Each structure stands twice: as C-alpha cells, then as structure tokens.
Image (tube, rainbow, N blue to C red):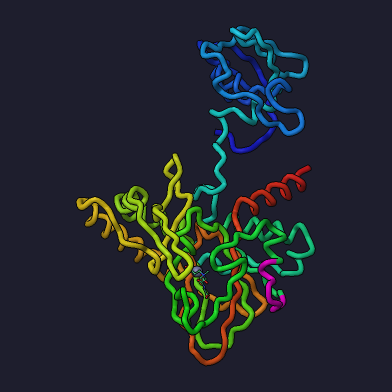
Amino acid sequence: MKSDNSINQIKKFHLANDELVIDWQDGSQSNLYSHWLRDHCQMPQSRNANNGQRLFSVINIPKNTSIEEVKQDERGDLHIRFMPENYWSIFSQNWLWINCYNLNNHFDDRSEKNKHLWQKNSFKDGMPRTKYKNFQETDEGRLEVLRAVRDMGFCIIEDASIKEGLVQSVISQLGFTRETNYGKLFEVRTEVKPNNLAYTNMGLGSHTDNPYRDPVPTVQLLHCLESSTQGGESVLVDGFNAAKKLREESSENFENLTNNWINFRFSDDKTDLRSRVPMIEVNDNHEVIKVRYNNRSIDTINLPSEKIRPFYLAYRHWGEVIERDELKVIFQLVPGEIIIFDNTRVMHARTAFSDKGKRHLQGAYTDLDGLYSLLNILENRNND
Ligand code: NM2
Ligand code: OGA
Ligand code: ZN
C-alpha cells in the first residue's frame, strides 16, 4: 500500500479479462475494473466542467461494459475505448496513480487509525494549546487548533478575554453553530431548578454530550468566564484510546457494545429527545469512529433476554475503563480559556465544586464537517 501522493510513471499496461493492469515504474501494480474506470470518467461529458460533479448514474453504464483498447499518448496519459458505447475516455497518469483503489488507503478522517491516541502521561511537554491572538489573527494559529482537534481530539485556546459570547465568535471562524434546545450558547453554572445535572455543582463522570440526539453535535466548546470555587477541575479522556483498551482486554465486550444499540433520552418541559445508537461505533473495517457515553441519559435498556447478561459485563467494563486514572488528563480551566473538543471521541468530566465562590462557563456546539472542511482548504492553500 502506498502512503503518499508522489508522482509515478506508467511502465507498461495490458488488459486482463475485465481489468486494466498497469505496471508502474516503482514496481507497484494497479488492477482496475472496467466498470470502475467507466464510472470514474473525468471527461466533460461525464463531469460538469465548473464543479467536477458527476453527470450520470451507475445505471447509465451499460451492463456489458468492457474495455476494447488502450493507448498511451506522449504525456503518458491513457486513452481507453469502452464498448458497447464505442466511447473514448482519457485518464491522466497522475489521476490513475492517486486514485487507484488497490494502492491507496480509503479516506476516513474519523477513524481511530488516523488519530494520535493519548492518555494521562502523554502530555509531559504540555497539552495542545494555542494563543487566542494567534488563532484570531493567523492561518497558522487556526491550523494549529484544527490539526490538534483532528489528531488529538482537543485544543485549549488560551489568553482570550472573558467576554460573554466569545465561543460564538470562535465558532464563526471555524464553521457554523449547531443550535440545540439548550440554545446557540448555554451557560454552565449552578441553577436553582436545573433541567440538566451540568447546571449544578455536582461532579460529572466521563461523558460525551447529547448522545440522546441523532445526529449528535460533533464538537463542543467551553469557555471559562469565572472560576473562584474549590474544585470544578476539568477532566478529559481519549474515548478512542479507552475503546482500544477495552478491545485489547476483551474483544467480546468490545464487540458487544458495537453490536448492541441502546436508547438515550433527555426530557424536560419542552423537549423529549431520544436516540438508539451504539456506545462504540465502528466503520466497515472495524475501526472505531465514534463513542457515546453519558450515564445520566441512558434510557431503559431494552435488549433480547439472552443478551442482557453479556451486555452488562461489557457495559460495566467500558464504564470502568473510561474512569481509569491513567487515562485521565486533569486540569483547571482558568478564566479566559476555551476548550474545544471532538465530542465523538473525547469524553469530558468535571469534579464537584463548592457552593462558595462562582464558576461560570459558556458552552456551544459546532460540527466536525465544517472544521475539517476549513482544515482541508487551509492545508491545500499551504501546499499550493
Ligand atoms: N448541556 C451543558 O449532554 C448533556 O446532557 C450534557 C449539556 C446542558 C448543554 C450537558
Ligand atoms: C457540560 C459539561 C463540564 C464543566 O456542560 O456538558 O460537561 O466543566 N461541563 O462544567
Ligand atoms: Zn458535558
């Protein structure tokens, strides 16, 4: 499997049954199925010239599509004639190299395999931090934050003001606010009749926010405005690393939680949100792409009788792993700091705090799609 997009040259090529076989200068070989090639035609008949979007559907490709002949031009590009359409399509050498499906890894920016997993002792040289001024004023600063969120799942933006609403202005630099029943922005502080335990001075165990919402908000921001109480420390756990530990210790328990979906629920006077989702979600290659956990919001667990006992073994094991001290990064968020984290990966918690003094955070949600999109744009701009 090749790991980069370096340029390569076609050494020779031939047809074998329903495949075009390309031997590359570096010794690697592409085997490309005729239907795949026809479907990926890059010509203006097949792709809109303004936006590159495909103009046809797979059902427009004749069932008996085959490759009749292939020629190479002086630039090295391949001209392929498809039958029964008698249609010539040109594929550039570089396109074939970069897109060949048997030589390239599939794209998955959410998978555990593309992340740097961490635990308590991973941050001896400090946690990912960026100065607010850098973030605000430079592409490098924004890139630093976005890369940290992509790779580590979080970043602290430090030395910001304690201006109310700052989380909204940070979000507007990165993507779009994900408004919920808690508002565009929510106040995390002790309330008299709270609709959520987050709005008390109680400690909160490791959790992801809003698992009862489908789709879940994928990014959360918390901005500290005031913190003069005893306690109220912030805790982060890499949920992908926790899932890895679970799998290493018991692949049975791991699979149990990917296969048995459970109900989450949140309700108050105006809202009744429900979901049925797995606590650990994997992709088609069995790699973890999402975790969900919030003991406060798990609804009645309803599984077939024979699955209840093994489920409880797995659930207890998972609940125990995510509370392990060696996985927890504990720190005090100070006024003027904003933490931004991937709510599909990083679990957060807080320790209880005293009712003397004041603790006030403002929070908001946004989504990973907007952040990754900006990251792709900024990275491509830097490569140009
Ligand atoms: N708040 C802080 O997901 C949760 O229920 C955790 C969320 C209320 C928006 C708290
Ligand atoms: C929350 C939450 C953590 C804190 O608001 O979702 O978990 O530090 N808060 O108060
Ligand atoms: Zn929370």
Q: Quadrant of the N terminus?
A: top right
In the displayed structure image, the side of residue 294 where residue 22 appears, left or right = right
Q: Name the chief secondary structure element in magenta.
A: loop
Residue 40 sits above or below residue 356 on the image: above
Q: Is residue 308 magenta?
A: no
- Horizontal and vertical percent for residue 66? 56, 11
User: How many callouts does the rendering have?
Assistant: 0
- Horizontal and vertical percent for residue 340? 60, 65
Residue at x 54% of width, y 80% of height: 189
User: Which of these two is toward me, 179 or 323?
Assistant: 179
Residue 200 sits above or below residue 268 on the image: below
Residue at x 49% of width, y 84% of height: 192
Task: Work out which residue is located at the far bottom of the displayed protein and give it.
Answer: 356
Residue at x 57% of width, y 60% of height: 219
In the displayed structure image, the side of residue 195 where residue 248 appears, left or right = left
Task: Work out which residue is located at the far left of the displayed protein and give it.
Answer: 306
- Horizontal and vertical percent for residue 173? 72, 60
Determine which quarter of the picture holds residue 326: bottom left
Residue at x 72% of width, y 69% of height: 132
| Residue 298 at least partly seen | yes
Q: Which portion, as a residue range, is magenta?
A: 161-168
Determine which quarter of the picture holds residue 184: bottom right
